[in-house]
Image (cartoon, coloured by chain):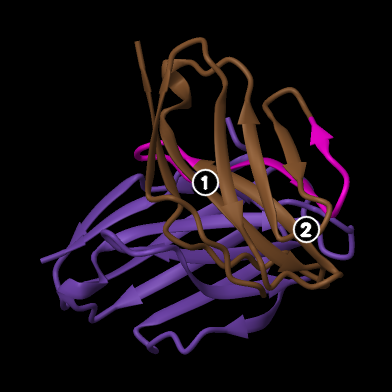
């Protein structure tokens, strides 16, 4: 149990579908992150939310739309994805303004786009 | 953030110490060394971090050289469950904990 819960664990969607990934953290943290891990590539940072404000967007295509309604929840809305978007999507949280606060990761959503 | 270099893979016998090296020769004075690991089909797990002093916790020890250009993560008594990809990451303390991951070291612990 990492304190960061991601649902669903697995998702298969067609290119015309719309789906959402959900992340919930139970650690009292105030910063949340989306990372993407494609096969045989390092984890790539997608988005950072700090105090519910988006503070970083790493040139992610608009077909990925994040939402952070409060400090405990983070969503990634998906629409018209491409097969190359198939990957493990990881959510993480940390305590901003606390020096040396490590990131705590969920176990990810394995997304397959057909 | 400074770049790190790790061997792509290492083996270790169960019960023995696993020593995972990391080279970070361009590290700056205000950059910390962090170690994470990722077991298959799970998210990365924080292990330990340090600035210049050696650190130890219930999972591992971190040895940082005096010039801070390299470090070693030590798992004192490796078990089969320690088989994972180990990431050495160097980062500046910022207002939020953004991490830049490399390829890491695949550690395989053998019976």
Query: How many C-alpha atoms fall within 10 Å of the one at disc 2: few (<14), some, or many (≥20)?
Result: many
Q: Secondary structure at mark 2?
A: loop
Q: Secondary structure at mark 1?
A: loop
Camera-side residue: B81 or A50? B81
Task: Answer with mark 2 or mark 1, whichever residue precedes in sequence.
Answer: 1
Q: Which residue is mark 2?
A: B68
Q: Position of residue B54 (x, y in %)?
A: 83, 39
Split into 4 quadrants, where in the image is the C terminus of chain B?
Answer: top left
Q: Position of residue A44 (x, y in %)?
A: 46, 70
Q: Which chain is brown?
A: B
Instruction: Say which residue appears at 19% left-offset and 78% top-offset.
Output: A82
Residue interval drawn in magenta? B38-56
Badge 1: chain ID: B
Give the spatial CA distance, label 2 vs label 1.
24 Å
Q: Which chain is purple?
A: A
Camera-side residue: A97 or B25? B25
Numbered badge on residue A114 = none
Badge 2: chain ID: B
The reply, left or right, for residue A58 in relation to residue A13 is: right
Q: Position of residue B108 (x, y in %)?
A: 37, 29
Count of numbered circles on the image: 2
Query: How many C-alpha atoms fall within 10 Å of the one at disc 1: few (<14), some, or many (≥20)?
Result: many
- B70 in the magenta segment: no
Split into 4 quadrants, where in the image is the N terminus of chain B?
Answer: bottom right
Instruction: Say which residue appears at 77% left-offset and 53% top-offset.
Output: A29
Instruction: Say which residue appears at 67% left-offset and 54% top-offset.
Output: B70
The reply, left or right, for residue A52 in relation to residue A4 is: right
Q: Which residue is mark 1?
A: B44
Instruction: Say which residue appears at 44% left-offset and 46% top-offset.
Output: B105
The single residue placed furthest to the left in the displayed view is A114
């Amino acid at each position: 149990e990492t304190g960061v819960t991601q649902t669903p664990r697995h998702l298969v969607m067609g290119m015309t579908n719309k789906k959402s990934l959900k992340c919930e953290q139970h650690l009292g943290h105030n910063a949340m992150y989306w990372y993407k891990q494609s096969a045989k590539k390092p984890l790539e940072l997608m988005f950072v939310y700090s105090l519910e404000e988006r503070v970083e967007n790493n040139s992610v295509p608009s077909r990925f739309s994040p939402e952070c309604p409060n400090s405990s929840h983070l969503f990634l809305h998906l629409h018209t994805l491409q097969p190359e978007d198939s990957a493990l999507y990881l959510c993480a949280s940390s305590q901003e303004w606390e020096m040396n606060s490590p990131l705590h990761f969920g176990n990810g959503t394995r997304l397959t786009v057909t | 953030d400074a770049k790190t270099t790790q061997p792509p893979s290492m083996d270790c016998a169960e019960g023995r110490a696993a020593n995972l090296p990391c080279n970070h020769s361009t590290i700056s004075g205000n950059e910390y060394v962090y170690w994470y690991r990722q077991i298959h089909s799970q998210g990365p797990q924080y292990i330990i971090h340090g600035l210049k002093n050696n650190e130890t916790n219930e999972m591992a020890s971190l040895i940082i050289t005096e010039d801070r250009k390299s470090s070693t993560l030590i798992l004192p008594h490796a078990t089969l469950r320690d088989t994972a990809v180990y990431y050495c990451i160097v980062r500046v303390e910022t207002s939020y904990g953004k991490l830049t991951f490399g390829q890491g070291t695949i550690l395989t612990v053998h019976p």
